[in-house]
Image (cartoon, grey):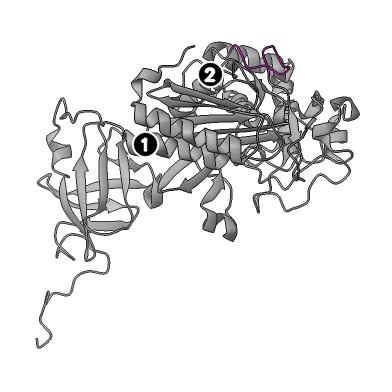
Amino acid sequence: MTTFQEELLPATRRALLHRIAVAQAEGRAPSVVAAVVRGGRAVWHGARTSVDGHGPDENVQYRIGSITKTFTAVLVLRLRDEGLLELGDQLEKHLPGTGAGEATIAELLAHTGGLAAESPGPWWERTPGSLRPELSDVLGKKPLLHPVGRRHHYSNPGYTLLGALVEELRGAPWEDVLHREVLEPLGLHRTSAQPQAPHAGGWAVHPWADVLLPEPLEDLGRMAPAGQLWSTTGDLARFAAFLAAGDDRVLSVESVRQMRTPAAPAEAADVVDGITYGLGMQVQHRDGRLLFGHSGSLPGFLANLTVSVEDDVAAVVLANCTSGPLLGSVGADLVRIVAEAEPRIPEPWRPLREADPMVLELAGQWYWGTHAFGLRVTADGLISLGPLTGGGRRSRFRSNGDGTWTGLEGYYAGELLRPVRGQDGSVRHLDLGSFVFTRQPYEEGAGVPGGVDPKGWRGIAD
């Protein structure tokens, strides 16, 4: 066992076990296994099974279905980071002749490429991949159902194309590239394209009777990059830690942050549900938390990986049944249980090592028109600007080294903040993407566009 259960309080461990026990019992699953990650490592492992005796542990493989897509997305981002492609490139540039080449690589990653959800022909998840030996067999005669880039439409064939793209640019099978570039560096030795003992069997549970039917375990062939992988809670716990913090041997923290940044247009129902999609990652707002990860299902198996970066908690849940427990809800609940019972202890506040007087001069209160903002200089070398009260536009800014700053998020992402100085060198106002911020509301002589009434502020009787 490689978990560290003693690091969670007994009451927390019991609450976690209770949650998966309810899921296994009410969901009528042959088995449910789970792990919780905190501080970059597994701190709890639990299992419930219908079989007497030794239950499955963190080394037992389950099929993880579409969590495979996140692994494929990591490979594509590696190609981008090496300069072999751009996310804005059309697929046709690197993989010509597919019939879906007008979709960009980013659109395929975000399921906005307009492709069909499934492959034509027999149900691909329950039939051998040999029935679809070529990309044309996966895509069919009409691969595009929607205008490219206009809507989020989940597409398994889209990830088949991404897997083929990896093979084209690496000159090796997708499985070999994945093993060499992701699984080995991260130490995911129990993750594989084919089942390796010990592994769970996949079952269908009759909806109206407590009986079972074994599900076929097919090799998906060309569709493998969309859902082939087998893994364990131990390996997926390590993968979850990587998705939160990055690993320069595989992907930087900036690249994994881009993966979990929303990249798909949300439809009305998605806005209500608080769900969107990044680059190979599902993103959702639930219980006041921003969660990311991926779910997965194939006949006989269900899987879920959920991460909350702010809480520094992740959960992995696997089951060996075609339907039953709602593992997305279970994963979110496991994160919530730990985050609420044992909230993250923040790092100690520390002051700046050195104070730059020209930066400190920017700190304090500013006004955009009559809206009051506060600008803070923080120990991480950034500045932050946001409303003093209520909601509104706020952002952190990174120094460009020439006295200007670039916004990092929200409305001001990529926008330039430029302190405008007078002849004496003092800051007269801030120019932020043409918006002028002054020390006083509509300060006279501070460069407010349209000027300031020379009579100044006045009462209603003036």
**Whether residue 259 is visible:** no
**Whether residue 244 is visible:** yes
Helix, strand or loop for the magenta stretch, by majority: loop
> Mark 1, residues whose alpha carbon is within 10 Å: few (<14), some, or many (≥20)?
some
Which image quadrant for residue 81?
Answer: top right
Question: Residue 197 colored magenta?
Answer: yes
Q: Residue at x 77, y 46 (%)?
A: 116
Q: Nearer the viewer, residue 8 or 225?
A: 8
Q: Which mark is residue 339?
A: 1
**Disc 1 secondary structure class:** helix
Amino acid type at circle 1 is Ala
**Disc 2 secondary structure class:** helix
| Residue closest to the far front | 52
Image side of residue 249 versus residue 62, left or right: left
Which image quadrant for residue 450?
Answer: bottom left
Q: Which residues are magenta?
A: 189-199
Amino acid type at circle 2 is Gly
Q: Residue at x 82, y 35 (%)?
A: 124
Question: Residue 358 colored magenta?
Answer: no
Q: Quadrant of the C terminus?
A: bottom left
157 is higher (above) or lower (below) than 195? below
Separation (CA) of disc 2 from disc 1: 20 Å
Task: Write down the residue under mark 2.
Answer: 234
397 is higher (above) or lower (below) than 220? below
Q: Position of residue 14 (x, y in %)?
A: 41, 30
Q: Which mark is residue 46?
A: none
> Mark 2, residues whose alpha carbon is within 10 Å: few (<14), some, or many (≥20)?
many
Counting residues from the N terminus, which is met first, the one under dot 2 or under dot 1?
A: 2
